[in-house]
């Protein structure tokens, strides 16, 4: 299958929507010869920070010798971004070959009730096929949503990293931190000690502690056995196995230090020991994370960020002053999906900006710009409405 044909087929699967359950992905992977069993994996779950942690973990894994890959979602520009090998999107040829194999396997499945493979299941299977066929030995796999019934929850013997827990997708995962923690930690087998837990709010910490006790999980915990500190682009991470000093971290945001700590502890679990700091530093220098406090222009300074829930917006707003410095005014061009807590997000954003320009992305579920402007004004921030994104940016 050509890359163009692969994109068209994947995009067409969107009409099927998202449906929880592991029956389809298991049947699909069996038909493909179980590619999910061909590598050692770090399975990354959590509310925020999954993509960043996956990129950092893949860089750490690859620095130690094995060929490494990352499976990410969503993409920013192209579907190939979701399947990374050696820190770069998979090639056009390999993407087409992997999706083609999944397409053929999906066409031959006999699923009950006329059910069919979903878009995320097809992409997940394609990533495993691409990794297997490219000889990728160590994987960082980002869960899509939740954990228990996510299509990525098919990795035998994987180490697990829980980046954090916050209230999001409450209609699907539960409306308490305890319920959400249980769904995400369900990817861990009972009694496991191959688990890293990132920084948590007090409510989330209580929920995760209770779930770990109930399931006899023995995690490496941020703030107890795992620490990160630093200034600017130099970071110190202490894991149970080693202290890593003077690590270069080119990506912006203080929260990325915590993501790095989770990634390194997870990589140690996958590889079974501490990492060699020399190659690790070289690999970290090359890591870039699109869409996370990403500076894309200088006059005026223009920063992109994909914060999409209140916790993510709070972390972004806290780190934004370190990016913009003394430049004023700071204006935010904002679009939010209608099923998000836009009120809480705009309240947090208002602390860091002097103007909101409310717009509407091309997504079918994008909230009304007029509503976003009203919420910003209610939070005490002046707001304008420009429904067309290009006009809003201008």
Image: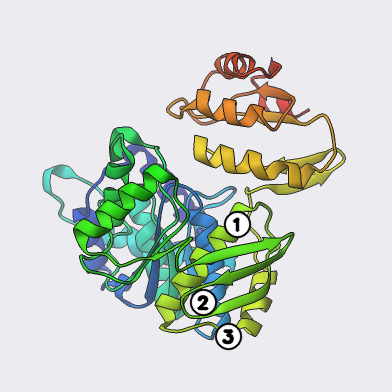
Provide residue 134's location: percent of width, then percent of height: 46, 77
Q: Residues within 10 Å of mark 2 (few under 14, many from 20)?
A: many
Q: Which residue is mark 3?
A: 276
Q: Which residue is mark 1?
A: 256
**Residue 167 versus residue 32 in the image, above or below:** above
User: Foreground residue, 266 or 117?
Assistant: 266
Determine whether label 1 and label 3 are within 8 Å by CB.
Answer: no
Provide residue 307's location: percent of width, then percent of height: 56, 40
Q: Which residue is mark 2?
A: 61
Provide residue 126's location: percent of width, then percent of height: 39, 62
Q: Earlier in the sequence, mark 1 or mark 3?
A: 1
Residue at the image point whose x is 26% and y is 70% from the top: 192
The residue mark sitting in front, 2 or 3, is: 3
Q: Quadrant of residue 28?
A: bottom left
- Spatial separation of the CA atoms under disc 2 and disc 3: 10 Å
- Spatial separation of the CA atoms under disc 1 and disc 2: 17 Å
User: Foreground residue, 96 or 187?
Assistant: 187
| Left or right, residue 394 beside residue 152 | right
- Spatial separation of the CA atoms under disc 1 and disc 3: 21 Å
Q: Earlier in the sequence, mark 1 or mark 2?
A: 2
Q: Residues within 10 Å of mark 3 (few under 14, many from 20)?
A: few
| Left or right, residue 380 beside residue 48 | right
**Residue 173 versus residue 245 in the image, above or below:** above
User: Foreground residue, 297 or 167?
Assistant: 167
Describe the element under mark 1 as helix, strand or loop: helix
The residue mark sitting in front, 1 or 2, is: 1
Describe the element under mark 3 as helix, strand or loop: loop
């Amino acid at each position: 299958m050509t890359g163009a044909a692969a994109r068209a087929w994947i995009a067409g699967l969107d009409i099927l929507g998202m449906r929880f359950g592991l029956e389809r992905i298991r049947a699909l992977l069996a038909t493909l010869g179980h590619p999910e069993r061909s590598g050692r994996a770090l399975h990354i779950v959590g509310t925020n920070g999954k993509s960043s942690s996956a990129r950092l973990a893949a860089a750490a894994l690859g620095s130690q010798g094995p060929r490494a890959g990352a499976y990410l979602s969503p993409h920013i520009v192209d579907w190939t971004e979701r399947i990374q090998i050696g820190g770069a999107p998979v090639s056009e040829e390999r993407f087409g070959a992997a999706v083609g194999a999944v397409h053929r396997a999906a066409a031959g499945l006999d699923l009950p009730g006329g059910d069919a493979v979903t878009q995320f299941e097809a992409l997940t299977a394609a990533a495993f096929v691409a990794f297997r066929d490219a000889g990728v030995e160590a994987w960082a796999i980002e869960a899509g949503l939740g954990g228990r019934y996510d299509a990525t929850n098919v990795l035998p013997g994987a180490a697990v990293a829980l980046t954090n827990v916050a209230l999001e997708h409450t209609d699907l995962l539960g409306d308490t931190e305890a319920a959400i923690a249980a769904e995400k930690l369900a990817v861990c087998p009972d009694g496991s000690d191959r688990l890293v837990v990132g920084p948590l709010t007090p409510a989330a910490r209580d929920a995760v502690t209770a779930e770990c006790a109930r399931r006899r999980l023995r995690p490496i915990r941020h703030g107890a056995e795992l620490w990160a500190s630093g200034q600017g682009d130099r970071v110190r991470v202490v894991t149970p196995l080693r202290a890593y000093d003077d690590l270069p971290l080119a990506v912006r945001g203080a929260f990325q230090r915590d993501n790095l700590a989770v990634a390194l502890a997870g990589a140690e679990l996958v590889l079974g020991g501490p990492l060699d700091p020399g190659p690790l530093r070289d690999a970290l220098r090359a890591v870039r994370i699109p869409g996370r406090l990403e500076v894309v222009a200088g006059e005026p300074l223009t920063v992109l960020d994909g914060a999409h829930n209140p916790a993510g917006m709070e972390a972004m707003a806290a780190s934004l002053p370190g990016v913009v410095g003394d430049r004023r005014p700071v204006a935010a061009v904002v679009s939010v999906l209608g099923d998000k807590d836009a009120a809480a997000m705009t309240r947090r954003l208002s602390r860091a900006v002097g103007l909101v320009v409310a717009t509407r992305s091309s997504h079918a579920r994008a909230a009304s710009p007029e509503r976003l402007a009203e919420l910003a004004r209610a939070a005490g921030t002046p707001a304008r409405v420009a429904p067309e994104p290009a006009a809003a940016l201008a």
